[in-house]
Amino acid sequence: MNASVRGKHSLRRLKLPPNPKVRVGIAIFVFFALLALLGPFVVQNVMGLSPSDVDTTQAMELPSAEHLLGTTATGEDVFAQLVVGSRISLLVGLVAGVITTTLSVLVGVAGGYLGGRADSFLTAATNVCLVIPGMPLLIIVASYVQGRGGWLTVALVIGLTAWPWGARQKRAQTLSLRHRDFVSAAEMTGESRWGVITRELIPSLAPIISVSFLGAVVGSMFADAGLSFMGLGNINITSWGSMLYWAQNGAALTRGAWWWFVPPGACIALIGVAAGLINFGIDEISNPRLRKPSKEVRARARAARLHAAAGRSAAKATAGKSAPVQEAAS
């Protein structure tokens, strides 16, 4: 019974605030997640479309009932490419975001809490990586890899070059928490350093980690699209970035083929908008001043105000009746 009660309380604590912006952001993320999971199967096996079938007789066709988003310069279906490419683009963003966030949390939190030589070494490594320009380094590494290893290599390259800024931010937050009472209490109870980091500090930094993870996912998708657009990614794999690359090579902009480059760019932008909307909800969770009271709380406050007003009215009425009695007695 106690376990079920604790489970209900934990679910209430994890419930996002009733913010329409957050709901819209989550809805966009869920839509693209379902698109990446089920879309390729539906497009290829149910609708019978292929993202790589070439048909020059149907090149550069406008969107129609047969081709919902038109065709490319070689007759490939843009809608099929958009749906199939969503899986690769989201996988790159998620894997690179996990790598970036994990490295930044380990380096930043461990350095900020341990202090001493460990902090000096980790801070020096972070500063060295910060001095190196991120985008040029990413371009050099990607050009050397030349897309070998598929999307996983691209995600590793992005994730291993994007963690220093997050590590610096989390170290600064850890320094402000390391001498708090709850950390001192955990140390006094004999908790190990790793236990303090994983059970006390990281949960306290959960809102910051969540925000940085969403930013890392969106930034990784932008980086993947940029690398593919420059021809440094694996352009033979269908993704939103490779769609932009082939649209550029096919002079889609000058030929007015908006249906070729607008859909992948709009999808990437929508995911960025969704991440920004969800950040509003995370801010409300982490900052109580931004939270809006629930309907139940507002109803209780309204009832309390009405009760207080009724009490004041009754007190005034009682005072008004007792005043003539006192005058008569005097």
Image (tube, rainbow, N blue to C red):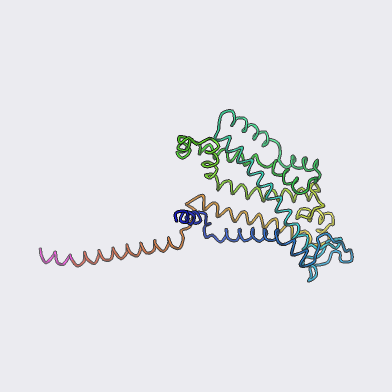
Q: Is residue 323 magenta?
A: yes
Main SS, magenta region, reads: helix
- Relative to 186, does residue 98 appear above or below in the rendering? below
Q: Which residues are magenta?
A: 322-330
In the rendered image of this protein, does residue 93 appear above or below residue 192? below
Q: Quadrant of the N terminus?
A: bottom left
The tally of labels here is 0
| Magenta span includes 56 | no
Residue 186 versus residue 263: which sits nearer the camera?
186
State which quadrant residue 48 falls in.
Answer: bottom right
What percent of the width, then of the height, locates residue 313? Answer: 28, 66
Q: Is residue 262 visible?
A: no
| Residue plotted at (53% across, 41% down) | 201
**Place of residue 54 in the rendered image (x, y in percent of width and height, measured from the top left):** 87, 61
Q: Position of residue 188 (x, y in %)?
A: 45, 34
Residue 71: x, y in percent? 82, 64
Please give the name of the residue rendered at 14% of the width and 66% of the height, measured from the top-left corner: 325
For the C terminus, the image quarter is bottom left
